[in-house]
Image: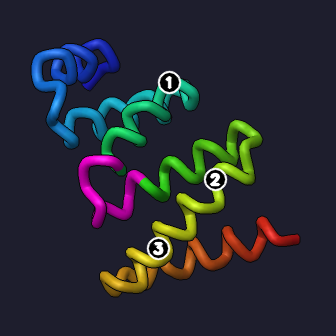
C-alpha cells in the first residue's frame, strides 16, 4: 500500500495503532525517516508492550544521527524482547547497543 493510502486510513482512524505503524513502515521503506517518527511514537505511547515500534524508532533516530535519543528506545525494546522471549530481536538489540558504546 502507498503512503497516501495509509495517511487516509490514519486520518479516518486516528486512534488505530496498526494504521500508524503501517504508515511508519511505508515511510521508512521510502527513506522518509523523519516523517515516520510521530507515527512510531504514537505506537509506543499507546501500546506499552509493543516491541517493534521501539526498535524501529531507535533505529530511525540512529539513522538521523540522534544516538542519545535512540538509546532509551533500544533499551526499552531489549527489555521487551527479553521479557517476551524474542531471541532474534534480543540478539540484534544487544549487538546494536554494544556497537553504540564503541
Q: Is residue 37 left or right of residue 19?
A: right
Task: Report the magenta residues as a range.
Answer: 45-53
Identify whether 15 is placed above or below 83.
above
Q: Is residue 25 left or right of residue 22?
A: right
Q: Which residue is mark 1?
A: 35
Q: Which residue is mark 2?
A: 70
Q: Residues within 10 Å of mark 1 (few under 14, many from 20)?
A: few
Mark 1 and mark 2: Cα distance apart in space: 16 Å
Q: Residues within 10 Å of mark 3 (few under 14, many from 20)?
A: some
Mark 3 and mark 2: Cα distance apart in space: 16 Å
Mark in front: 3 vs 2: 2
What residue sits 18% from the left and 25% below the top? Answer: 14
Mark 1 and mark 3: Cα distance apart in space: 24 Å
Q: Is residue 58 visible?
A: yes
User: Who is closer to the viewer here, 41 or 30?
Assistant: 41
Q: Is residue 14 left or right of residue 25?
A: left
Q: Is residue 52 magenta?
A: yes
Identify whether 78 is placed above or below 85.
above
Q: Helix, strand or loop at disc 1?
A: helix
What number is the disc on residue 76? Answer: none
Q: Which residue is mark 3?
A: 89
What residue sits 43% from the left and 31% below the top? Answer: 38
What residue sits 39% from the left and 52% below the top? Answer: 53
Identify whether 86 is placed above or below 57.
below
Amino acid at each position: 500500500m502507498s503512503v497516501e493510502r495509509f495517511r487516509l486510513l490514519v486520518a479516518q482512524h486516528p486512534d488505530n495503532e496498526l494504521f500508524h505503524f503501517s504508515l511508519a513502515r511505508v515511510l521508512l521503506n521510502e527513506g522518509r525517516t523523519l516523517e515516520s517518527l510521530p507515527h512510531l511514537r504514537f505506537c509506543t505511547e499507546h501500546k506499552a508492550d509493543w516491541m517493534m515500534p521501539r526498535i524501529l524508532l531507535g533505529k530511525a533516530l540512529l539513522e538521523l544521527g540522534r544516538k542519545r535519543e535512540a538509546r532509551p528506545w533500544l533499551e526499552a525494546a531489549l527489555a521487551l524482547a527479553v521479557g517476551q522471549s524474542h531471541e532474534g530481536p534480543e540478539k540484534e538489540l544487544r549487538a546494536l547497543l554494544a556497537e553504540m558504546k564503541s
